Image: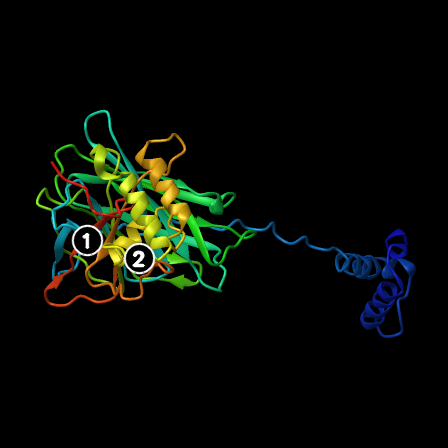
Amino acid sequence: MSGLTQLDATGQAAVIGALWAQRPAGGFATVSALNTPFESAVQTALDSLVVVPPPPPQEPVVQLPEPLSPSEPPPSAPVGGEVASRKGVALTGVELSASVTTDASLRLEWVGERVAEDGGRVIEFALVANVGAEPADAVQFQIAAVGQTVRVAAFSPAPALAGWLQVQSIDDGVLRYAAATYDTEFAGAQRLGTLSLRVDAAHDGALGVSVDGYSLGANAARSLFLQYDEAVTLSGAYQLTGLEGALIDLSLTASAANLPRGAITAQDALEALRLAVRLPSDYANPFGYIAADFNQDGRVTSQDALEILKAAVRMPDAIQPKWVFLSDDADLSAISSRNTGYKSGLTLDSLSASASHNFTAVLLGDVNDSLVFV
């Protein structure tokens, strides 16, 4: 009877119903004949009360992407041109990078480089994902460097992936990476991490990076190829191949640290002031206005003249001069003393059979274009 008392009214009724269904004709003759079916009915009712706990939650299984062969850049027309000063003098020591995006979901952004102990280089790129409105709860990709003298050295995940289950391996200079989570998602543009490439000292010229077979949550993407040139040639010309994609960004940078002392003078400050107050000037043209907007706030004012003067006399808190590179394809007709908006570099959304794009380098602060290359 002890088992029967553990049952509620419904359970007890189930026991009575089971006994009734098993009763012999004329009923149970003795109490002993009742015991076995009674105990069996009670145990069946008790078993129905046992709650089977659910299985523990399974952590997501993170699997590396299937190994792929490094992608070679697709054949395409070369992109080339010249990089010269306002006077038409070829500019040397210009670093040129070209990023090619075939899908807007993932892109590589050049971060910087340093010299390795053995004379080679370590070049870093930020891997940036844009998953759109659909949150991503999984990331998977494979990155390979194109060429025998360039290889992937390391990948450092960004805080956006902190706490995710992660697996990564670098074999033969090819990075395979996967991450999955069930409690943290992200949407929109996120920096996934920093990719380090190891470039041998013997490497000369352009290098390429391919990203293959990647997915961002439910957003499956195709691939992208990035090419980076260490510098344009000494003649001030450049040529890139393998550029084919939905969007191509050409970015140019050059150091202004070793300029001749007389490049920026008090005369430049005076010319900037003349442009600011709209007095007649021989430099009232797009290049002159852009050079005069020394603090790059979008217009030429007396503050620019003051900052140029501070740079001319090398005051400690002076703004450092810098180069900007204007494509000869750019429309500069709207540039004025009140509007110096421009884009340095060039964005291409298509390639012609023979693409030539030249750049004019403008040194900010050198309003009267007095820089002489020696």
Q: Which residue is mark 1?
A: 360
Residue 94, position as x, y percentages in the image: 19, 43
Identify residue type, mark 1: Thr
Instruction: Tell me the quarter of the image containing the N terminus.
Output: bottom right
Q: Dot 1: what SS? A: strand
Does residue 157 appear to the left or right of 274 in the view shown? right
Q: Is residue 225 visible?
A: no
Identify residue type, mark 2: Lys
**Is residue 246 or residue 217 the one in the foreground?**
246
Residue 308, picture quadrant: top left
Q: Residue at x 53, y 49 (%)?
A: 59
- Which is nearer the N-term, disc 1 or disc 2? 2
Q: Residue at x 26, y 58 (%)?
A: 286
Residue that lies at the very extreme toward the left in this rendered image: 235
Does residue 49 appear to the left or right of 286 in the view shown? right
Q: Which residue is mark 2?
A: 343
Does residue 50 appear to the left or right of 184 in the view shown? right
**Is residue 70 or residue 5 the one in the foreground?**
70
Residue 187, position as x, y percentages in the image: 49, 58
Residue 290, position as x, y percentages in the image: 30, 53
**Is residue 123 or residue 252 the one in the foreground?**
252
Residue 188, position as x, y percentages in the image: 47, 58
Residue 244, picture quadrant: bottom left
Q: Residue at x 37, y 50 (%)?
A: 296
Q: Is residue 51 visible?
A: yes
**Res 323 label:** none
Q: Residue at x 87, y 54 (%)?
A: 6
Instruction: Tell me the quarter of the image containing the C terminus.
Output: top left
